[in-house]
Structure formats: C-alpha cells, structure tokens
Image (cartoon, rainbow, N blue to C red):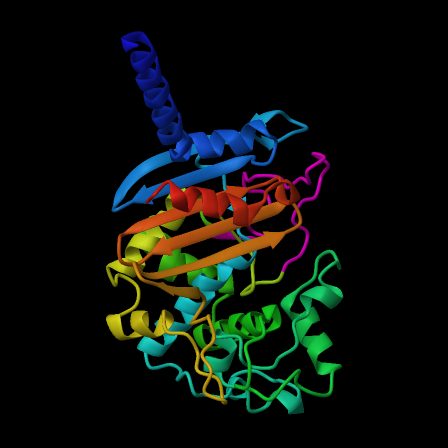
Amino acid sequence: MRTSIFSAMLGLIFILQLSSCEKRPRNVVKNYYDKGEFNGSVLVVNNGKAVYDTALGLSNIEKNIKLEKTTPIYLASLSKPFTAVSVMLLQQKGLLNYEDKASKYIELPAYAQNVSIRQLLNHTSGIRDYESIIFSKKGLTNQDVLNWLNGLNKLQFPSGSRFEYSNSGFIILSLIIEKISGQSYGTFLREHIFAPLGMKNTWVYDSSTADKSRATGYNKEKQLDDYSILTTGDGGIYSTPADLYRFDQALRNFKLINKSNTDLMYTPATLSDGKISTYGFGWFIEEADSGKTVSHTGGLSGFRAIFWRDLNHNSCIIALTNQGDAFPLSDFLNDMKRTLQ
C-alpha cells in the first residue's frame, strides 16, 4: 500500500513539474521552434525583469547566416506606434494640434479636406486603406498611395463615425511629419527617438539603409518572401526586441512624451454615436480586471511582429519572425501570456 501511495505521489509531482515546465516562456518558444512555426527573436519581461531573451534560427537561409538577438527584423505595422509618438512630439513642440485638418499641412483630395490628425491617429478618418488594393506593387512609395487616394471620390464612411484600420491614414501622418519637420521620416525618427534611446539596431528602410545587415523574409516553405515596398508611417521600420523594450521603458517613464499625451495615447477613441473603439494613438487597447494592456502587431511578406505591453505590471512580450506565414501569432501570444500568470 505504501509503495502504491509513494508511486502515486511521485507521479503527481512529475505531472506538476511538467505542467510548470510547459508554462515557462523558454518551453513555449522551443515548442513553436521545434514545430517549424517560429524563426526569430523573443524578449519576455515580467514585472520589470527579463525572464526570457533569445534568437532562434537563421537570418538568411541561402547564406546560412544565424539570426542573432541584434539582427534587425521588419516590423511592418508595428511601426505605427513610432509614427504616433512622432506626431505627439510635434504636438508637444506646439507645431500641430490634434484637431488640425491634415489638409492644413499636405495636399489631399477634396473629399478628405476635413479629416483631422486625431482621426488619422485612431483610424476613424474614413480614408480608404490601400493595402488590399495596391500593396503588391514592388517599390510602392507614399506618393504612389497619395496618387491612388487622389483617384478616389469619397471617404469610406463619415470621419469619426467608426473605426476602420487604415494604413493610408498613417502614410498621411508620415507626410505631415516630414512637412512640419523638414526632415525625412527616417531622419526624424532617428534623431528624436532611436538615437536618444540608444536603439542602435533600429532604422527606417530607404535607399540609404538598404544595404544594412538585416533579416531576410521567407514563407513557411522557406521560400524567399522579402520586404519590397518603400512606404513609411504605416511600416518601414526594422528593429529588435531589445530596442523595442527600450522604447517600452521610455514610454513608461515619460522620456519621450509627457503624461497627458501618454494617457491620451492609451485612451480609445469615442465614435460619433458614442460607442468606444479599441484603438488609441497607435495602440490597440484592452481593459481587464487586472488592468490595462496595449499591443500592436505587424505582418507583411515574410515578417510578423507582436508587441504586447501590460501597463500595470511592467510586463511585455515581444516576438519578431522572418518566416511570416509559418507563425500562428495569436496562439503564440496567448500561450506566452499564460506564462506570466
């Protein structure tokens, strides 16, 4: 009898240890890597302490180059928080107001004359998203998107009446940043965000940075699917988890934008019918009993990105991959969040 009880206790201990092991970030990431679903870099911070920081796989398959933690990976739409912060920096300098019409700064088609900067920031502008129509054009530029918008004759819906994610709107914000600052989008971000925060492996892709060392994009069959467009504002940034964590800490400690703008950044838009959206200035927002979390994802060609931030517990999950469609992003994030509980 004692032997059977002892064996049962050992079995229970083994199951508990196995369960605990499975809940560790290291084991979650290894599971996805072993299944061929993740190739990239990950940083997990729990209550201000880094609990997992790694890079797995290859940066370039053809050349058999190992992917390092310092290898820049394309962020795609995860660039949008940087665009939003850039606009807020201009606001803090008194160079623009959120209620300003975007047409005050750049030429827009007649139907978009009354779209405000605030509506562009929180995706309530009604400006039609270009990505499902013309994004497949290699070398696509902001001016190409603006030309396409000029060929349309109306907004998708009255500005402020609903939330509709629009990459086009963030391209317009990029053009406004360039108009007001007199600098390219990449130069403005480098001088006002990347360099001050020590983000040494973060930059905006353009002709001057095209030859920088970076991860090459692939699909799940490991076929080449690299970044091939040149738009900014909606995307364009390469970075690393460590650099994104520097950005996270700067936002938490008001090193870039002040507290009132920080609060505004994490406040979801109120629509014209009184309903509340789930997006602030460059972040998706979720309220829970445990507090507020904000996040943004990115996905284009052979790249996927996730940046999830628990504002109350100084925790975050950052994952970047250069084997895009192999990565089940939502499942991965849910599994990783469970390791922080």
Q: Is residue 77 left or right of residue 62?
A: left
Q: Say which of 274 and 284 sits in front.
A: 274
Residue 207 visible within the image: no
- The number of numbered discs placed on residues in the rendered structure image is 0
Task: Kindly indicate the quadrant of the structure image that contains residue 253.
Answer: bottom left
Residue 143: image location, x then y, percent: 66, 71
The residue most toward the top is 3
- Image coordinates of residue 19 in percent, x first then y, are 39, 30
Which residue: 60% across, 46% down? 303
* Residue 8: percent from left, percent from top: 35, 17
- Left or right relative to 150: residue 5: left
Q: In which quarter of the image is the C terminus?
A: top left
Vertical side of 305 occupied by 157: above or below: below
Place residue 274 in its image quadrant.
bottom left
Q: Is the magenta stretch mostly helix, strand or loop?
A: loop
**Residue 93's quadrant in the figure?**
bottom left
Q: Can residue 326 be seen in this view?
A: yes
Residue at the far front in the pictured view = 1
Q: Residue at x 73, y 87 (%)?
A: 153
Magenta span of residues: 203-230
* 213 falls in the magenta region: yes
Q: Quadrant of the N terminus?
A: top left
Q: What residue is at 57 percent from the left and 48 percent from the top?
A: 304
Can you give x and y, in whole percent of width and height, for residue 282 in the image?
A: 45, 67
Q: Which of 71 and 160 is in front in this view?
A: 160
User: Can you say whether 17 is above or below 329 in the image?
Assistant: above
**Image vertical order of residue 20 relative to residue 305, above or below:** above
Magenta-drawn stretch contains 16: no
Vertical side of 219 occupied by 184: above or below: below
